[in-house]
Amino acid sequence: MTDPATPSAQPLSAVRLDIPGGAEVTHRDVAANGARFHIAELGDGPLVLLLHGFPQFWWTWRHQLTALADAGFRAVAMDLRGVGGSDRTPRGYDPANLALDITGVIRSLGEPDAALVGHDLGGYLAWTAAAMRPKLVRRLAVSSMPHPRRWRAAMIADVRQSSAMSHIWGFQRPWVPERQLTADDGALVAKLIQDWSGPRPPEEKALENYRRAMCIPSTAHCSIEPYRWMVRSLARPDGIQFNRRMKRPVRVPTLHLHGSLDPVAGVRSAAGSGEYVEAPYRWRLFDGLGHFPHEEDPAAFSAELINWLKDPEPDR
């Protein structure tokens, strides 16, 4: 009998994909924080753990997996809880628990620490993990996502930023967002990615893969549960307590990457995140790119990331 928390064998074929260029990634499951997580792994060396955002899965890092492995790193891209090949659990989608998923995967991989690289929701969780479990995070790189306290302040007080993230407000409705995301074989997924990209959106094949992955049973629901928590907890004790916990500064070298044309997370919202970093902090704005700089210009993104990872003394 199939475990209801795990996608069936047929949908798994939609996420255990090869990557361009012929490199053979290793797909496997690891146990962490009471769940199973699918990872795609390539290369040997210091661990770099890649965290995807919405509405994607591990495959968004296909270009960086190859680039990092070629540069001498052990590159691992994981599917977050409820997405891709990872367990779909009935609960556990608050950021504190999702951050424990990430640090648990680091331990399960047998590593003392990792450089975390997160995009969008993965970036939000990377910020969280670096603040909550600093001993397990060697370096932090975040793309297209402000620090959680900046995100919260912008959603409450910045009308332009709140409007730009109107999809998150829409996620608060019951069941309707799930139906919209899976209608017409996930057509909305492709539309969102195209609308949020700059002039060079991901190729059609990539969009097809993201659509297919979103249509795996329960994925749409699980993928928006973190955003429901983020909004519904704004005035709740658990959300207020999380916001207080995130006052704890990040004390590892941090690289903050952002597209100048990002229509989702505004430059103004993201740029102030350095105030929460008490370590070398580098801000890099990619001119002419949107919300997915790692896919829109993978060569430039990978070069910036790898040069920073290899820099023994990253500047502030």
Image (spheres, helix red, strand yellow):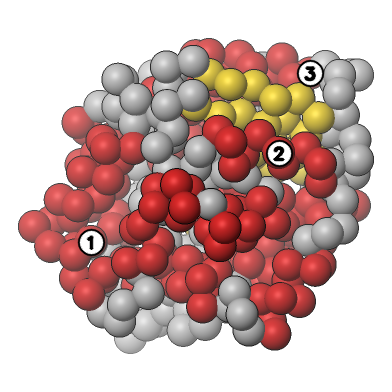
The answer to whether residue 305 is left or right of residue 213 is right
Circle 3 Cα neighbour tier, 10 Å, few/some/many (<14 / 14–19 / ≥20): few
Whole-Å distance between the Cαs marked 1 and 3?
A: 39 Å
Instruction: Provide residue 286's location: percent of width, then percent of height.
Output: 53, 19
| Residue 175 in view here | yes
Q: Secondary structure at mark 1?
A: helix
Residue 310 is tagged as 3
Q: Nearer the viewer, residue 278 or 156?
A: 156
Mark closest to the chain's N terminus, 1 or 3 = 1
Residue at 58% from the left image edge and 36% from the top image edge? 268
Q: Nearer the viewer, residue 298 or 248?
A: 248
Q: Which residue is mark 1?
A: 181
Mark closest to the chain's N terminus, 2 or 3 = 2
Instruction: Provide residue 299's location: percent of width, then percent of height.
Output: 49, 14
Q: Secondary structure at mark 2?
A: helix
- Asked if marks 2 and 3 touch (Cβ < 8 Å), the reply is no
Whole-Å distance between the Cαs marked 2 and 3?
A: 25 Å
Residue type highlighted by circle 1: Leu
Circle 2 Cα neighbour tier, 10 Å, few/some/many (<14 / 14–19 / ≥20): few
Mark closest to the chain's N terminus, 1 or 2 = 1
The answer to whether residue 110 is left or right of residue 239 is right
Image quadrant containing the C terminus: top right
Residue at 30% from the left image edge and 40% from the top image edge? 193
Residue at 34% from the left image edge and 37% from the top image edge? 196
Q: Which residue is mark 2?
A: 272
Q: Of all residues shown, which one is farthest toward the left?
A: 184
Instruction: Provide residue 179's location: percent of width, then percent of height.
Output: 19, 70
* Foreground disc of the pair 1, 2: 2
Circle 1 Cα neighbour tier, 10 Å, few/some/many (<14 / 14–19 / ≥20): many
- Asked if marks 1 and 3 touch (Cβ < 8 Å), the reply is no
